[in-house]
Image: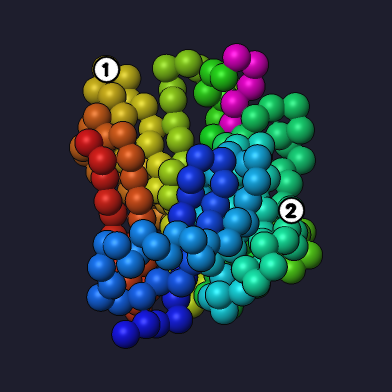
Amino acid sequence: HSNSCFVLLLVGLSAYTWPASVGISAEQAASRLAQKRTLLIRERVFSVAFSPDGKRIAGGCGDGTIKVWDVSTGKVRLTLRNPSTLHSRWAIGSVAFSSDGKRIVGGGNLNVGDGDRAGVEAKVWDAAGGKELLNLVSEKGFPPRSYQSIQSVTFSPDGSRIAIGGLENVRVRGLRTKIQLFDATDGKEMLTVKPERFNVRGVRVAFSPDGRRIALGEIG
């Protein structure tokens, strides 16, 4: 029995899609690698997301851009750039489409010089024309011990809010989770939560289908 979804696979510096099926054997799955379609070439891709209609894929890249590919052709339809990173390196660790497919949120870490952590940024763009709509987070010039990172971004199901999950450094005690909730219309911060758990290395956030709860996943 087959369904109509696709699996996206990142291999090295390239990305591929191929049809996904339910209940197939490992041998069948391996053979379907031959059906893959190359979408990305010579890119460092840290995060990917399908548009709600399945026609586009957004990828957060290591050069500080978000590229949007056409699933049917594999061609780049749009490149979203962050003007503040022209003389630095911004690794976009997480991207997501809004439920109507009209907006893209991306967040990541800003690096300069020899790679010392220099800040975090999260922004919202128009998914059609690439115009920057909101600057949710823009924190730069951290002292070396104040490491922070944005690792997960997502829209609420109705597109009215954006949740961001990241890490902040608490002196002596180590890294802990930081969750921020923003209004997706005006970009104003609505809520910040900092669970008292430390030595966390990875964070992921997700909304429930009704948008009333946020799930948090941590790697310790």
User: What span is in magenta?
Assistant: 110-114
Q: Main secondary structure of the magenta part?
A: strand
Q: Which residue is mark 2?
A: 79
Q: Residues within 10 Å of mark 1 (few under 14, many from 20)?
A: few
Q: Mark 2, mark 1: which one is toward the viewer?
A: 2
* Residue 139 visible somewhere in the drawing: no
Q: Which residue is mark 1?
A: 172
N-terminal of the pair, mark 2 or mark 1, is: 2
Picture coordinates of residue 113, whole percent (x, y) = 64, 16
Picture coordinates of residue 166, whole percent (x, y) = 40, 42
Residue farthest to the bottom? 1
At x 74%, y 68%, the residue is 128
Q: Is residue 73 left or right of 147 when viewed as pictured?
A: right
At x 33%, y 67%, the residue is 28
Q: Quadrant of the C terminus?
A: top left
Q: CA distance from mark 2 to mark 1?
A: 41 Å
Quadrant assignment, res 184: bottom right
**In magenta stretch: residue 146:** no
Quadrant assignment, res 105: bottom right
- Viewer-side residue, 63 vs 31: 31
Local SS, label 1: loop
Give the residue type that dot 2 points to.
Answer: Thr
